[in-house]
Image (spheres, rainbow, N blue to C red):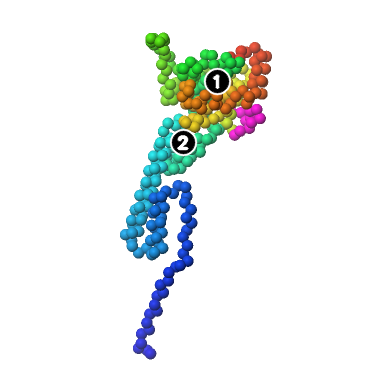
Amino acid sequence: MAGRRRSAPRRSRRLVADHQPASTAVPPAVSAAHLAVVARLAVLVVGGLNDMLAFRSVCKAALCAAEEAGSVWRRLCAATFTGKVYVPRRALELQAAGSFRAALMYAAKDSHRTEMTFEELTSFTWHARVKFAGIAGTAAVGCPWWAGAPCNLQRYHADGTVRRVLRAPVPITHTASGPRQEFLDDDAANAALPSGPVIATWRFPRTSCGRSPRHGSLVRTRNLGLVAEQPARTVLRNRRTWGFVLDGCWNVSTSWVMPKRGEDPAMDDDNLPTTEADVRSEIEALRRLVQSTNVSPKAVNAHA
C-alpha cells in the first residue's frame, strides 16, 4: 500500500565470539606496570571504547609508567657509569640524548671489547710496571710500584714513539719512620704532565706466536737502541673499571691509575693471563739478540 510506511530493519547485535587475544609473550624490558596498562586498554577496546574519560585515564597511566621506566633506566645508567674510567663516546651521547637504556646496553657490550683503536691507545696516560718475574727474575728490582710508589708513566704518540711522562719533583718529608715522598697520582693530574724523552717505538702487530686476533688486540714495542721488539702485549679489559690493560709476559700497563698491591686481585701477576709460555718463541728470538749484542737483560725491560 502506498500510504503504509515500511519499518526500518532491526540492527543485528552480534558478539564477536571468535576474537583471539594477541600473543602473551612478555618482552624482557616490559615491566608489570606496562602490562597492567596494556590489559586495561585491551578490555576497553574489546568491549567498545565509549567512555572517553576512561580512555584518558588509561593514557595517563601509560605515560606515568613510561616516565617511571625512563627514570629507572636513567638512575641505573648513572650508577653504572660512576667509577668507570672509560665509557665510550657513543654511550655518553646516548645518555645525553635521554636514551638511557640504549646507552647502558651499548656501554656494557663495549666493556668486553679487547681491541683498541689508534685514537684510544694514544689518548691515555699509561701506568706501567714490571711483573715480578721479569727477565731472569731481576726486572722487579727498581720498579717503583713494587716499593709502594706510583708507577712510571708513559704515552703512546701518533708518530709511533713511546715517551716517558715527567712527574713534577716531590719534596721528601722526614717522619718518625723515615723519609717519605707523597705523590699526587690521579688521571686528571697526570693528563696535564708533559711528555719526556722517547724510550721506545710501538705498533699494532697482526700476529703473535700463531695468534691472529683482530687489529688492535696486540701492541708491540721496541726499546730505544735495540733492533728486536719485545714480546707482544695483549689488550685486556678490567671488569671493575672498564679500563684497558696492556698485558705482557714481563710487564703490564693500565690506562688508569694502577691499583696498589692487593687492591684489585684481577691485576695481580698470578691472575693476569699472559705468561712467558704464551710467547716462548718471541722470547727466544729476543734472547738470541741479547746474547749476540751483549745487551743486559735488565736493559731490555727497562722502559716498563
- Tell me, yes or no, whether the highlighted magenta stretch contains residue 80: no
Asked if residue 295 lies left or right of residue 88, the reply is right
Residue indicated by mark 1? 131
- Main SS, magenta residues: loop
**How far separated are the C-alphas under marks 1 and 2?**
32 Å
Near mark 1 (Cα within 10 A), the count class, few <14, some 14-19 or many ≥20, is many
Magenta-drawn segment: 204-214
Q: Quadrant of the C terminus?
A: top right
Question: At 41% from the left edge and 55% from the top edge, which residue is drawn?
Answer: 38
SS category of the residue bearing label 1: loop
Mark 1–mark 2 CB contact (< 8 Å): no
Whichever of callouts 1 and 2 sits on the residue coming sooner in the sequence is 2
Decide if residue 120 is in sight here. Answer: no
Q: Nearer the viewer, mark 1 or mark 2?
A: 1
- Tell me, yes or no, whether the highlighted magenta stretch contains residue 211: yes
Near mark 2 (Cα within 10 A), the count class, few <14, some 14-19 or many ≥20, is few
Mark carried by residue 89: 2
Mark carried by residue 87: none
* Relative depth, front residue between 85 and 133: 133
SS category of the residue bearing label 2: helix
Decide if residue 277 is in sight here. Answer: yes
